[in-house]
Image (cartoon, rainbow, N blue to C red):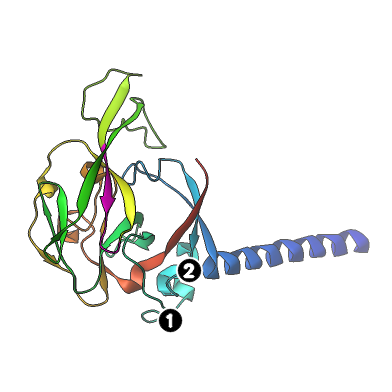
Amino acid sequence: MSSAKDSLVETVKTVVYALLIAGIFRTLFFQPFFIPSSSMKDTLLIGDFLFVNKMSYGYSQWSCPKAINFLCPISGRILGSEPERGDIVVFEHPTQHRTFVKRLIGMPGDRVQITDGVIFINGEEVTQTPDGNFVETFEKQGAAGRYPACANTPGEGGECIKEKFIETLPGGRQHSILNIRTTGVDNTQVYTVPENNYFFMGDNRDNSADSRVPTTMGGVGFVPEEYLVGKVSRVMFS
């Protein structure tokens, strides 16, 4: 009886230690993340499994898993380093407290404006080079079971087509973006990014809730640095 009891105690200890190690690893180093939406197509697809590098930008209250967020009484950001324009960043929504993944477009102090779907940063055009089309199957995707937005009108199982471009940010970093149609956020006011804040956009430009729309209208608005969780490290599988 004593032997069985000792064995149970050892098993419980092993499980507790494993959970503690996993929690520390996830809090300080890498956090697994599934892509839940289509806002970063075609760079990241719904269901992609990736790791978020939490060491990239330092640590804040939002570096801790949400279940134990209250155990991380960090004010501001510690061991912080500046993200780079073009990084794909996982962050906490400033008011909704949901996890988002977007591309960093505007740095603190930048003036950002979108005109006819083209970004201008500090008055300079961010060039877009045509790169053919992105084609996917018109069918329900992800846990939400939503159909993808298309430039054409396919039937079930048909080809959903979007225009594809290569966008070149200041500094030379390039990435793919998609265009579906003209929307209300293809033309915006000039946004001046406040100090210690960032401006994010999705690569699937016409199907992304991001910094082009303020939080009061259901968007993301400017994101304070303490809400940055980490940099997308690598996609493990799609």
Q: Return the x and y of residue 59 as percentages of the image width and height.
A: 45, 75
Of residues 81 and 164, the one nearer the viewer is 164
Q: Can residue 213 be spotted in the picture?
A: no
User: Magenta stretch containing residue 169, yes or no?
Assistant: yes
User: Magenta stretch containing residue 233, yes or no?
Assistant: no
Q: Residue at x 16, y 36 (%)?
A: 181
Q: Secondary structure at mark 1?
A: loop
Q: Return the x and y of residue 141 as percentages of the image width and height.
A: 38, 32
Q: Return the x and y of residue 168 as percentages of the image width and height.
A: 27, 54
Neighbour tally class for label 1: few under 14, some 14-19, many 20 plus, Cα within 10 Å: few
Amino acid type at image mark 2: Cys
Q: Secondary structure at mark 2?
A: loop
Please say if 162 is above or below 195.
above
Q: Can residue 191 be spotted in the picture?
A: yes
Q: Quadrant of residue 98?
A: bottom left
Please say if 159 is above or below 169.
above
Neighbour tally class for label 2: few under 14, some 14-19, many 20 plus, Cα within 10 Å: many
Q: Quadrant of the N terminus?
A: bottom right
Residue, disc 1: 78
Amino acid type at image mark 1: Ile
Of residues 175 and 97, the one nearer the viewer is 175
* In this rendering, position of residue 99 left or right of residue 116: right
Q: Residue at x 21, y 58 (%)?
A: 211
* In this rendering, position of residue 101 left or right of residue 161: right
Please say if 146 is above or below 159.
below
Q: Quadrant of residue 16?
A: bottom right
Q: Return the x and y of residue 115 as percentages of the image width and height.
A: 9, 51
Question: In the rendered structure, which segment of residues is drawn in magenta?
Answer: 164-171
Could you say which disc has been placed on residue 223 in the image?
none
Q: Residue at x 41, y 75 (%)?
A: 60
Q: Residue at x 53, y 68 (%)?
A: 27
Residue, disc 2: 64
